[in-house]
Image: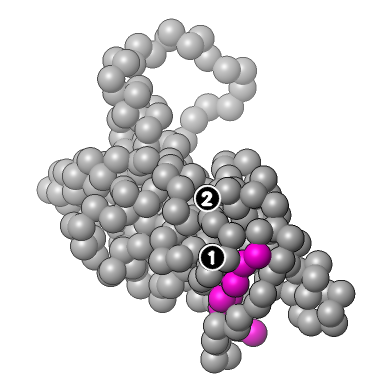
Amino acid sequence: MKLTLKIWRQENAKAKGKFETYQLDGVSPEMSFLEMLDYHNEKLILEGTNPVAFDNDCREGICGMCGLYINGRPHGPDEDNTTCQLHMRKFNDGDTIVIEPWRSKAFPVIKDLIVDRTALDKLIIAGGYISADTGSAPEANSIPIPKHKADLSFNANECVGCGACVAVCKNASAMLFVAAKVSHLALLPQGKIEASERVLKMVKEMDKLGFGNCSNTGACEAECPKSVSISNIARLNREYICAGLTHEN
């Protein structure tokens, strides 16, 4: 396959970035998208040009670090997929592929296609945990949990923190991410103890970090690589309202 790549190049958050165009030949349809970028970088290095900086880790669709905007969509044209699991057979010989980083005030560009997603870590630190006794694992059936609640909690917990929901939202909202973390714990007995404190702290931190309000378009659910349901945002709103009414200031 022969491709035209239009890639965003930017030295750092303060530098002015721009798209640069490259011609790439010899791309195998069996390559993953990141393998294609590796192949492209090898050619750039041999030509004495700086390689394109992009983020990745597991390459198994688990960590979410590989998030890229590809032809106007987070993670590219495939459905329910991370960038690292996207394969070049989804493209055609002669295609032009536009590749750019997440666009959000809360995600400043580090270099080229890499953005700083520390804001998501700060949201977790603000309250996305439970207090639990250490020691051996308890008996699995010691705390009965209805299956439908367990299923909802598992769906919320599938969030890998890639930031696609923020990138696709016209308000750069982190509502789906926060809602997933709040719902995952609020649905389980183990997370009830700190539920009100958790949701208040996480929403306050979300606003502090500069994320926008929910746009109510549903784009976050549509582009989430793990199909995390937008119904979690409704649960977040209920948890937040109830916490505001009952939590002591």
**Span colored in magenta:** 2-11
Amino acid carrying mark 2 in the image? Lys
Q: Which residue is mark 2?
A: 90
- The colour scheme of the drawn protein is one colour
Question: In which quadrant of the rendered image does the N terminus lie?
Answer: bottom right
- Mark 1 crowdedness (10 Å alpha carbons): few <14, some 14-19, many ≥20: few
SS assignment at label 2: helix
Q: Which residue is mark 1?
A: 95
SS assignment at label 1: loop
Check contact, mark 2 vs mark 1: CB within 8 A: no
User: What residue is drawn where x is 34% and y is 24%?
Assistant: 151
Eyeballing the image, is 83 above or below 80? below
User: What residue is drawn where x is 55% and y is 83%?
Assistant: 19
Residue 207 picture location, percent across and down:
31, 67
Is residue 7 located in the magenta-colored stretch of the structure?
yes
Amino acid carrying mark 1 in the image? Asp
Eyeballing the image, is 21 above or below 85? below
Eyeballing the image, is 58 above or below 72? above
**Which residue is nearer to you in this view: 37 or 227?**
37
Real-space CA distance between mark 2 and mark 1, rounded to the nearest whole angstrom? 10 Å
Instruction: State how many labels appear.
Output: 2
**Which residue is nearer to you in this view: 120 or 197?**
120
Residue 245 picture location, percent across and down:
12, 48
